[in-house]
Image: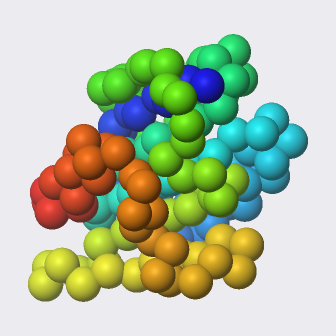
Amino acid sequence: MYRLVYVSTAVEGLADDDIDSILNVSQSNNDERYLTGFLAHNGRSFMQAIEGERDEVLNTYQRIMSDDRHQGVTQIIGEPVEKRAFPEWSMNYHRVDDDEGSSTMVVRQDESIDALLNPDMPRDLLYLFSKFLRMR
C-alpha cells in the first residue's frame, strides 16, 4: 500500500463544472484501480491524497501532473503505508466556499457527512489537510 499527497494551484477561471468533471472521472478511474483518496480545495489551490498499490498511485499521479486544469503540481508525501486513511472513498471532496471559512462537503457514494474525518486517520495527515483548508 502506498500514499501520495500533492498540492497544486487551479488555473484561472476553473469552474464548478470543471471540478465536477474531475470528481466524476476520478471516482470512476479510482474504482477501477482500487484507489482511494481525498481532494481538498481551499479556493485557489488543491491538495489531494491518493492511496493504493504503488504502481497505480504513481501512474495516476503522472496523469494528474499533465492535467492542464492546474499548475505547480508538487508532491509533498510519497510513502508506503500499512493501511488506508480513506478506505471507503474512491474519491471524496471538500472545499472552503467563502471568506468566513464555511465549508461544503460533496459526499460521494452515499457517505454521511460525519464520515468526513475518519477517526483512524493518521494525525499527521489530518493536521496537514486541516492546515491546508485554512490557507487562502
In the image, taking residue 93 as reference, residue 75 lies left or right, namely left
Residue plotted at (16% across, 54% down): 131
As drawn, 44 above or below 2: below
Q: Where is residue 67 shown, x and y percent of the image?
A: 57, 34
Residue with the most extreme right position: 32
Would you say residue 115 is visible in this rendering? Answer: yes
Residue 17: which quarter of the image? bottom right
The total of numbered circles placed on residues is 0
Q: Is residue 126 left or right of residue 39?
A: left
Report the colour scheme: rainbow
Residue 108 pos. (x, y %): 66, 71
Report which quarter residue 40 is drawn in. bottom left
Quadrant placement of the N terminus: top right
Query: Which residue lies at the image location 30% right of the left edge and 72% below the top edge?
Result: 96
Q: Quadrant of residue 27?
A: bottom right
- Residue drawn at (40%, 52%), measured in percent from left and top? 121
Q: Position of residue 94 (x, y in %)?
A: 42, 67
* Foreground residue among 122 and 101: 122
Position of residue 14 measured from the top left corner of the image (x, y, whole percent) = 46, 58
- Of the 4 image quadrants, the one containing the C terminus is bottom left
- Looking at the image, is 21 positioned above or below residue 83? below
Looking at the image, residue 68 sits to the left or right of residue 71; the answer is: right
Q: Is residue 18 visible?
A: no
